[in-house]
Amino acid sequence: MKVGIIRCLMTEDVCPGTMDFIVTREGKGAFQETGPVDIVGFVTCGGCPGKRAIPRAKMLVERGAEAIVLASCISKGNPIGYPCPHFANLRDAVMKAVGPEIPVIEWTH
């Protein structure tokens, strides 16, 4: 499976995404059921409230993503301990934008 990962812009300065790359490569965390996956793109939401996540999700699908992944920095607040207050709206908007045939995975690790 090929995935596109959307991460939080606010955590970009404190997290290089290392664990996201590890869990996708090793098929761990959110990828235990799928096994290892390939990353076709690793982008940010564009900053609060995450409106740029919508066109970026579409772009990732156009570039081969078979699923969109919202990194744990958005849904769980890793590593700063502050989940995105816009998570539900961002998730719902991305799901609507990519359609029901593209799953949206809500976390990475």
Image: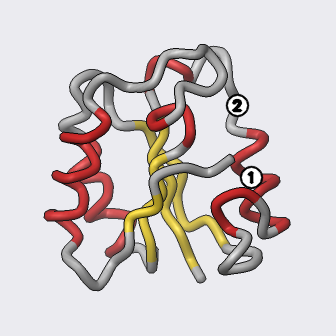
Reading the image, the residue beneath label 1 is: 21
Q: Are marks 2 and 1 in contact (CB under 8 Å)?
A: no
Q: What number of labels is visible?
A: 2
Q: Residue at x 74, y 52 (%)?
A: 21
Task: Identify whether 87 is placed above or below 92.
Answer: above
In this rendering, position of residue 58 left or right of residue 35:
left
Residue 104 image-quadrant placement: bottom left
Counting residues from the N terminus, which is met first, the one under dot 2 or under dot 1? 2
Q: Residue at x 31, y 36 (%)?
A: 87
Q: Residue at x 53, y 25 (%)?
A: 77
The secondary element bearing badge 1 is classed as helix
Badge 1 density bin: few <14, some 14–19, many ≥20, Cα 10 Å: some
Name the residue nearer the viewer: 35 or 40: 35
- Spot occupied by residue 32 in the image (x, y as percentages of width and height): 73, 70
Q: Relative to 12, is 91 above or below?
A: below
Picture quarter with the N terminus: bottom right
The image position of residue 27, as x and y in percent, is: 78, 69
Q: Quadrant of residue 95?
A: bottom left
Residue 64 vs residue 86: left or right? right
- Residue 63 versus residue 55 in the image, above or below: below
Residue tagged 2: 16
- Image check: 10 left or right of 89? right
Q: State how far apart marks 2 and 1 are (Cα).
A: 10 Å
Q: Which mark is residue 11?
A: none
Inspect the image, locate mark 1, and give the three-letter code of the amino acid beneath it. Phe
Give the residue type that dot 2 points to: Pro
Q: Is residue 34 above or below residue 77?
A: below
Residue 59 in the image, given as x and y percentages of width and height: 31, 63
Q: Position of residue 88 (x, y in %)?
A: 26, 41
